[in-house]
């Protein structure tokens, strides 16, 4: 079966990198390696072989670990469009998701009846990526709508950073009575980032203001705005928050 290992970079940017692997064949693929060392140690410790690297986008903190992994394991950065079968157990869909950067892509991994979205800097827990370094907010809005319409509610979300605390505090301003936000914030405050569970899109829709534009539109503050205008407003507010 396919297993997924998460690596947290203890840096200011709070990067997440991932490794997924077939526990029978040992074939493994790294996603957005921030630091090569811990990923290498894990691969060697588990007796895996790194078959490829996937990068959601070209910002340095998402490709930083590529070269040391390539040197050690003689593998390549995978580039593809659409669905690619990896080994016996996994299919990964390379989906264009421009907005944070214009060449951003997300990876939807399907295996053993489950779906896992590696969302890079497109979706975070309780937020979306910013568009300050080569992105475009309208494009991110369209990408968000596209992904929300195509993803099953049970899809598990693996974001490129841990910005949960700030995002949840931001979200609470617009939805102060939301128990889902409060409970998640409590978890973030009391649980180590490494111990935190992976959340589904269904859970995310209850806490992420960028996924709740129809709900926000019922608020007097936003009733005159279109959903796209609310998305722009949220992105701008979060940029300066
Ligand atoms: Fe980025």
Image (tube, helix red, strand yellow):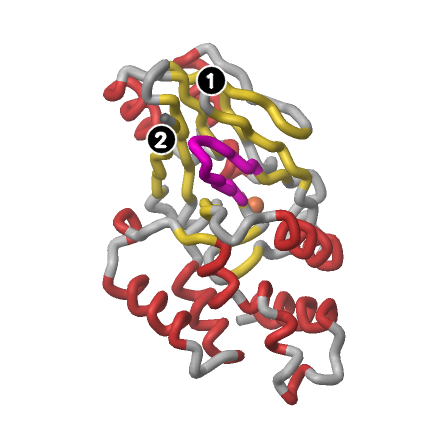
Callout 1 environment at 10 Å: few (<14), some (14 to 19), or many (20+)?
Answer: few
Q: Nearer the viewer, residue 99 or 133?
A: 99
Mark-to-mark CA distance, 1 and 2:
13 Å
Q: Nearer the viewer, residue 65 or 146?
A: 146
- Above or below, 75 against 99 in this view is above
Q: Name the residue: 25% across, 54% down.
A: 192
Q: Position of residue 104 (x, y in %)?
A: 64, 40
- Above or below, 194 against 175 in this view is above
* Residue 91 position by quadrant: top right
SS class, disc 1 = loop
Residue that protrudes farthest toward the front in the picture? 113
Residue that protrudes farthest toward the top in the picture? 74
In the rendered image, residue 114 lying in the magenta stretch gets the answer: yes
Q: Earlier in the sequence, mark 1 or mark 2?
A: 2
Q: Position of residue 178 (x, y in %)?
A: 43, 77
- Above or below, 40 against 208 in this view is above
Q: Which residue corresponds to mark 2?
A: 3
Q: Position of residue 185 (x, y in %)?
A: 35, 68
SS class, disc 2 = strand
Where is ligand 1, by quadrant? Answer: top right
Q: Nearer the viewer, residue 56 or 148?
A: 148
Q: Name the residue: 55% across, 37% down.
A: 108
Q: Which mark is residue 19?
A: none
Quadrant of image for the N terminus: top left
Callout 2 environment at 10 Å: few (<14), some (14 to 19), or many (20+)?
Answer: few
Q: Name the residue: 26% across, 49% down.
A: 195
Nearest-to-viewer mark from 1 and 2: 1
Q: Which residues are magenta?
A: 107-119
Q: Name the residue: 45% across, 45% down.
A: 158
Q: Position of residue 19 (x, y in %)?
A: 40, 30
In the rendered image, residue 16 lying in the magenta stretch gets the answer: no
Q: Which residue corresponds to mark 1?
A: 88
């Amino acid at each position: 079966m396919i297993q997924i290992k998460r690596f947290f970079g203890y840096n200011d940017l709070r990067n997440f990198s991932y490794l997924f692997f077939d526990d029978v064949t040992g074939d493994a693929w790294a996603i957005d390696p921030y630091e090569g060392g811990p990923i290498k140690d894990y691969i060697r410790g588990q007796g895996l072989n790194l078959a490829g690297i996937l990068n959601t986008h070209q910002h340095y903190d998402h490709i930083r670990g590529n070269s040391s992994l390539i040197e050690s394991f003689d593998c390549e950065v995978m580039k593809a469009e659409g669905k690619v079968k990896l080994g016996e157990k996994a299919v990964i869909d390379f989906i264009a998701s421009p907005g944070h950067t214009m060449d951003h892509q997300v990876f939807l991994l399907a295996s053993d009846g489950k779906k896992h979205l590696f969302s890079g800097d497109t979706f975070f827990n309780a937020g979306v990526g910013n568009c300050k370094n080569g992105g475009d907010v309208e494009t991110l809005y369209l990408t968000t709508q596209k992904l929300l319409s195509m993803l099953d509610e049970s899809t598990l979300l693996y974001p490129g950073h841990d910005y949960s605390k700030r995002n949840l505090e931001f979200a609470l301003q617009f939805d102060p009575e939301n128990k889902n936000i409060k409970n998640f914030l409590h978890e973030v405050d009391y649980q180590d980032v490494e111990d935190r569970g992976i959340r589904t899109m269904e859970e995310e829709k209850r806490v992420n203001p960028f996924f709740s534009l129809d709900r926000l539109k019922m608020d007097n503050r936003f009733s005159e705005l279109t959903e796209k205008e609310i998305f722009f407003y949220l992105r701008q507010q979060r940029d300066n928050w």
